[in-house]
Image (cartoon, rainbow, N blue to C red):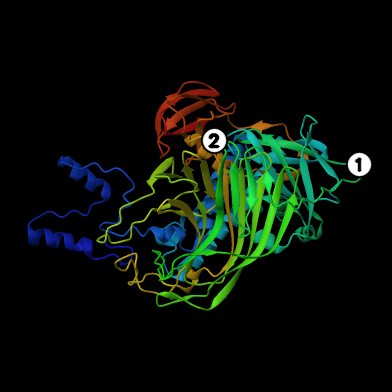
Amino acid sequence: MNGTDHEMPIIELPEKFNEWSKEFGVEIIHSNLENYIDEVLKENPNLERVKGELREPKYEPVLKDVTSTRIYLKVLNFSSQLLYLKYLEPLSCIAKILGINSRNNEIDYGWKNILKSHPHDSICGCSIDRVHRDVEARLYASIEIGIGVLVKLIDNIISKIGEESKELNIIVYNPLDKEGKRLVELYLNLDSPNFELYDQKGNLIESYIEPIGIISNEYFDIIGKTKYMLMNQIRGFLMDKRPGQRLMLPTFKLSFIADLPPLSLTSFVLRKKEGIVKKEEENLDLNFENNFYRFNLNKDGSFNLYDKIRGIEIKNINYFEDQGDIGDEYNFSPTEENPIRVIPEIKSIDVKDKIFLKLIIIKGDISLPAYAEERKRSSEKISMPFIMTYTLYRDFPRIDVTLEIENRAKDHRLRFGIDLPEEIDKVFNDGYYGIVEHDTRVENREEYVEENVPRYAMESFVVLLGEKFKMMITTQGLHEYEVERKENETSLKITLLRSVGYLSRGDLKTRKRHAGPYLPTPEAQCIGKYKLDYSFIMLNSDKEKEFYERSRDYLLCPVAIASPLKIKEWRLMEIPEELFLTTLKISEDNKDIIGRFVNMGENGIYNIKSKFFRKAMINNLREEYLEDLDGEEEWKIYFKKGEVKTIRFQK
């Protein structure tokens, strides 16, 4: 604390304390924050209680737009954290229970790469370019290490609990702590698509097999769900004696929907089908309907949605909006022009019908000003190619979007938007352990150091609750949204890209002074290719429990691997619907299993069951003992609404 993040610490400061104490006749103590607070409270001061996020920029800038700076870092970080929190750590617990290598050292090493990326200037993207090259390399390293560990853990677990089989088995790990119908996708090396999938009871599972061709290196560079679909190929590289040959084998994509138990491994059988598999008839209809909604594609690539449950149509969902940005890495600052509703040039639309889901693939270009000079955007235009894929499900109330886009323009902010069918006064998003409520109108005063607008940060989802409609948008690494209200119109915008060229500038419309050193950062223009994922999800209620269920169902895809071994259904733990598992990891002392739960229901007693543990106790967040819990293999625990509890489980 002997300085700020843009100044070096004063090394000789401690030596001055004795000198100054004598000079001024007071005792100067080199303290820390904890002791300082204790000393202040001993004076019994009359302190005002403040509630809220402390986001109002009255005296100091909040620097809110770091949530959209260098979006490639945000996407990488989100993917890496999800991989370690929801896949690797729970699987390492299963390995420890089974008495096999938990890969804890490798997981720790991956976490260190993530944590080295988390100093605030590093992950916020507000430093010089060289710093962020290092951050990007660390996050990529954490993902590459993590995917390798994921394959090894699942393969070793299957080897421990599996049984010999003469058939090809598909072993699925479900990271969700709730039971439900899930989509499973994986790439397989097969000699033909003539296969059918069965569960362990011999029931035929609805599945779809399509040829992919040869897996190219580009597949392995993609972050997100595609990486999990490559489990078999990655296993080949790690385990095969001649892994290069695997690249030359015919590859097929297997997709199926199955009911999966929570936190489980489940086995399916892939059997050769006699005769020729009938190819699905092509369905070129650009519209879609299920039990939840009716989807109609618009000419600009956006869509209209008719909510069949509530009988209301929501128009203009997922359109592009772009605006000039002559801000810096800390804050957006607009050029003189108003934002433009981007009308893409659509070059092709392909439709793939896979029985239980439908893909609409739109290829096109968007034309934008190439850069900004002074306070105006250039007359020179530049074309940005994109591929946007809508995934529409027969059985799920959601629409997934994957946007692959090459950013070639500088000094701009690209967002997607949705026009709401009614005005709303509040908007909700997820925080660390619960929901944060925000106003859609905020006070913005001339004397504020930074412009105050209803632009907020979310972890992964934002919820829109009106009298006529209920919807949420879940994203993978896109953290910035804004509510705009003009007369009787309300819209929501989520930032896809923000391109700027300076670490800090002193001439912003939206901030009154520099936030850091005036240094050029050309790589913050974010020129390059991006794959961005998000989902529009219809809601039944305004319950927090449903928000988290639906968002996790989208974010936490099952992972699968092909194996000559079969397994019986293997469940780690049973958790009530109201409780959500935020962490499942090996304890820091490497002795026990730590589970951290948050209650999204009402006050009450909830049962947690696991046949693998004999004893449980409540710990604090530092994994220190607080109290024992009664029971063996089942524990009744009282939770307040919204309460977080850390429980240590022992074998």
**In the image, is residue 118 above or below residue 586?**
below
Residue farthest top in this picture = 631
The residue type indicated by label 1 comes to Glu
Circle 1 sits in a helix, a strand or a loop, which is it?
loop
Q: Name the residue under label 2.
A: 540
- Give the residue at x 41% y 70%: 335
Instruction: Return the x and y of residue 298 as percentages of the image width and height.
Output: 62, 56
Q: Choose between 306 and 559: the one closer to the eye.
A: 306
Q: Mark 1 points at which residue?
A: 274
The residue type indicated by label 2 comes to Asn
Circle 2 sits in a helix, a strand or a loop, which is it?
loop
- Give the residue at x 61% y 58%: 403
- Give the residue at x 57% y 29%: 574
Asked whether the viewer can see residue 89, the reply is no
Q: Choose between 339 and 198: the one closer to the eye.
A: 339
Count of marks placed on residues: 2
**In the image, is residue 151 above or below residue 590?**
below
Residue farthest right in this picture = 275
Instruction: Return the x and y of residue 405 as percentages of the image width and height.
Output: 60, 64
C-alpha distance separating marks 1 and 2: 43 Å
Q: Choose between 506 and 28: the one closer to the eye.
A: 506
- Give the residue at x 66% y 36%: 181
Q: Which quadrant would residue 270 be assigned to in this image?
A: top right
**572 to the left or right of 450:** right
Q: Which quadrant would residue 211 be assigned to in this image?
A: bottom right
Q: Which quadrant would residue 329 be assigned to in this image?
A: bottom left
Instruction: Return the x and y of residue 575 as percentages of the image width and height.
Output: 55, 29
How packed mark 2 is, by other alpha carbons closer than 10 Å (few <14, some 14-19, many 20 or more), is some
**625 to the left or right of 92:** left
**In the image, is residue 406 above or below residue 36?**
below
Looking at the rendered image, the quarter that the N terminus falls into is: bottom left
